[in-house]
Image: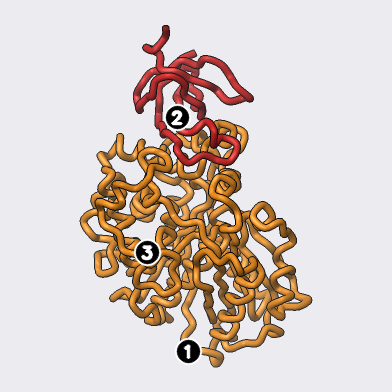
Chain colours: A orange, B red
Amino acid sequence: MVLGAGKTAFGAFPDRSLRSLAVEAIEHALHDANIVPSQADAFYLGNFAGAPFTGQNHLAPYVASHAGLNGIPCTRVENACASGGSAFYQAWQAVGAGLYDFVVVAGVEKMTSQATPKVAEILAGAGDMATEGACGATFPSLFAMIARRHMYEFGTTREQLASVAVKNHANGARNPLAHMRKEITLEQALAGKVVAEPLTIYDCSLISDGAAALVLAPLERARGLSNRFAKILTVVQTSDHVALAEKRDITAFPAVVAAARQAYDKASVGPQDIDFAEVHDCFTIAEIVASEDLGFVAKGDGGRFAEAGCSARNGKIPINSTGGLKAKGHPVGATGVAQVCDVVAQLRGEAADCQVPRRRIGLAQNLGGSGATCVVSILGNV
Amino acid sequence: MTGIVYSETVIFLAPADFVNEAPYQIAIVDLDNGKRETGRMIEDRVSIGDRVTLCEHRNGVPVFKKSNAVR
């Protein structure tokens, strides 16, 4: 069960440290769970690159000790952009194994203290440094090559990519915790500065600071503390090659396809049962590919699905109703935890202006690198 | 050695060590020997399906150019 959820705002916060962001999110989650810090039995922290960004390592106890979580096992989990989802997976397993009553899981990244070329260099470390980094490849360039191939094979258009950005900006404008609360037009998205052809600045998620946290507990402990808990139906984590060139087909992520298939099996649901989803739109093409890999739409039709409004907040399957990584922001290590926080808020009917109409079952999909780690979580109303 | 471009992009926003080289093109190339490699393109810009020739390795990175652009 998710007993409590809490997030900081996402954005550029020059006066905030990594630790203060993480502590704030943990305090929100503990308060939401109606427990005190001394009740926590274990702590997992998702973080990608704390040391390159801030100089600080040994982050799990560094954060936990300032949140009142003293003396308990504290473990940092790193899986690139899926660090948060992977930390959530560890926490969920620990609760499921019966080891603990209350587990706190947080995700945090502090990115904006570095200049953009340095950020690009650090993020490139989520790819294969020997074969991709050495070429001068950036993360946007890897997804740009995915986009080019998807356009070549399926006729996906620049306009369809841009329609994802327009939708997510419109959603983010309704989210008070989003980094970018500004609607954009299709023309603006298409005319953006090129980052890596065919992707413009509007196809790319944001460089953000932020944190998110959850409190997990077994059902028997959750009962009586809160009536607002959300049930974790399943969490599945999968993996694949890190280098893009080691994949046979880059227009799909086998790790996502496998995670989705296993998650649907374990939760005894199908893609048609998912009421809404938070997916990993690190780039617009990634949301299009995710909608296909998760089975919401047939292979190759993801661009047309987005352009037709099927993934809008009132569409067939609302995707990223909170703005996604594109507008909400993408503090890398926080993202996977924040997605689950957002799913929980939707299930509870507490998503305010971002609320989706149907809220029985929600899905979160967190992707690491260019598809080498995937975490798919399915949550439901009890 | 030659190969066929499987996908490509031109990078405008480069990492710190490559800022002075931007914009530059990289590509994933299906080589005639069955291997698939990521490399740098020089000279003419290429598109998916173009035949390219492996010119050299620079710091371990394969460098390709468009096959019909041989001068």
Label 2: chain? B
Question: For the residues marked 1 and 2, what is the alpha-carbon distance in whole angstroms?
Answer: 55 Å
Relative to A149, is A50 on the left or the right?
Answer: right
Q: Position of residue A363 (x, y in %)?
A: 41, 66
Does the image show residue B16?
yes
Residue A326: x percent and y percent?
Answer: 41, 58
Residue B25's disc number: 2
The reply to whether label 1 and label 2 mark residues of one chain is no
Where is mark 3, residue-wise?
Answer: A320
Establish if A120 lies above or below A246: below
Any part of residue A86 in sight: no
Q: Amino acid at mark 2?
A: Gln
> Which residue position is annotated with label 1?
A227
Q: Position of residue A38 (x, y in %)?
A: 71, 84
- Give the Cα distance between marks 3 and 2: 32 Å
Instruction: Point out the image quarter for the C terminus of chain A.
Output: bottom left
Q: Amino acid at mark 1?
A: Asn
Answer few, some or many: residues within 10 Å of disc 2's Cα (few below 14, many 20 plus, some between 14 and 19): many
- Residue at x-position 51% and y-position 39%: B14
For disc 1, the neighbor class at 10 Å (few under 14, some 14 to 19, many from 20) is: few
Discs 3 and 1 share one subunit: yes
Q: Nearer the viewer, mark 1 or mark 2?
A: 2
Callout 3: helix, strand or loop? loop
Query: What is the number of callouts on the image?
Result: 3
Looking at the image, do the residues carrying marks 3 and 2 touch, with CB atoms under 8 Å apart? no
